[in-house]
Image (tube, grey):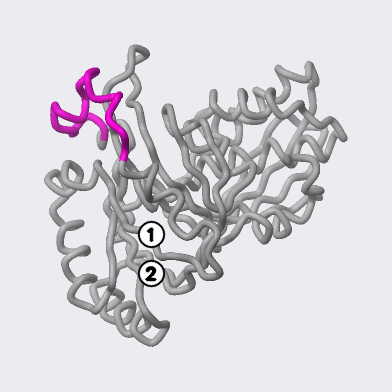
Amino acid sequence: MLILPSFAKINWTLEVLGKRSDGYHELRTILQTIDLADELAFELTSDDLIIECDSQQVPRDESNLIARAVRQFQKTTVTSFGLNVRLRKNIPLEAGLGGGSSNAAMTLLALQRLFNYPLKLKELFEIGRGLGADVPFFFTGGRAIGVGRGDEVYPLEDIEENSILLVNCGVRVPTKVAYSLLAGRLTSSEGKDIIPFSLEAAYAGIGRSRAVRPELRNDLEAAVFSRYPLLTEVKSRLLSSNAQAVAMSGSGSTVFALFESCTALIAAREEMERSGWWCAHVRALGRTEYLEKLGALERADID
């Protein structure tokens, strides 16, 4: 049996530059792995594919990204095998934290190890892109800038951020819904040549002895908040709880806040939890530590 953590992410920035000819949106986003993680256990069997999970909300059929990753691996390697996958779910669903994409990425990494069949890096990233825009990012983790659909990922120097509070009020925001709510100026095909804010934000702190806290921005936030007003309340209450910066992650619905100290964060968390909202105190997970925590892979396998 092979066991891997499957870490979540947040978006320091997410900018929508316009509509692409393929129907997707042109994005610039700065991604960051955090130390919140699901757990995946893989075991080869004589059956086909069985997915087990401790959450009833997670599909166990072929629509699950884990299943789609397995099928793509089988197709690429021309192999047939039985596999039992047990998923312990800690990352909220449809929450802008990349849980499903992370699960898919870890499945591909695990299968390479189980079969001693390392895919070429190009093959790995192509499979990942086909599964979802966030999947390639989870092959390397840390802090990175994503361009195109967000699936072209370029590593950046890591920063240190230890006092991050995640708050999820139970609203689920499908990604397609979030993008369908965007204002016309963000879906115009004429906006793609704009120099994005995130290019400047991406290099904050590089070459310095201590990390520079990023400036937060999410172009999806206003549209999503207008449809789901409870998220506006979450952000407002976090700002009133002495958070230094607050933003929605990805397409929502998780809102995260940065605090000066753990003491301030704990006080805010206690207040948020009184409303029955899910909360988690997390920290930014740098690339080296991320790869080490995967445990089952040598770093050279995915560099």
Which residue is depicted at the point 48% across and 72% down? 162
Q: Which residue is mark 2?
A: 165
Most distant residue in the right direction: 116
Mark 2 residue type? Leu
Distance between mark 2 and mark 1 Cα atoms: 15 Å
Q: Position of residue 19 (x, y in %)?
A: 28, 21
In the image: residue 289, left or right of residue 93:
right
Element under label 1? loop
In terms of secondary structure, what is the magenta stretch mainly?
loop
The residue carrying mark 1 is 214
Q: How many other residues sit within 10 Å of disc 1, few (<14), some (14-19) or many (≥20)?
A: some
Give the quadrant of residue 209: bottom right
Comparing 96 with 54, the one in front is 96
Tell me the residue at 35%/48% (across/down): 13
In the image, what residue occupies the spot 36% across and 79% down? 260
Which numbered mark, 2 or 1, is in the foreground of this view? 1
Q: Farthest residue toward the bottom?
A: 263
Nearest to the observer: residue 35 or residue 171: 35
Q: Which residues fall within the magenta stretch? A: 179-196
Q: Residue at x 72, y 40 (%)?
A: 109
Q: Secondary structure at mark 2?
A: strand
**As drawn, is 212 to the left or to the right of 229?**
right
Which quarter of the picture shows residue 110?
Answer: top right
Q: Earlier in the sequence, mark 2 or mark 1?
A: 2
Q: Is residue 186 magenta?
A: yes
Where is residue 229 drawn, in percent x and y? Answer: 13, 53
- On the picture, is 262 further left or further right than 75? left
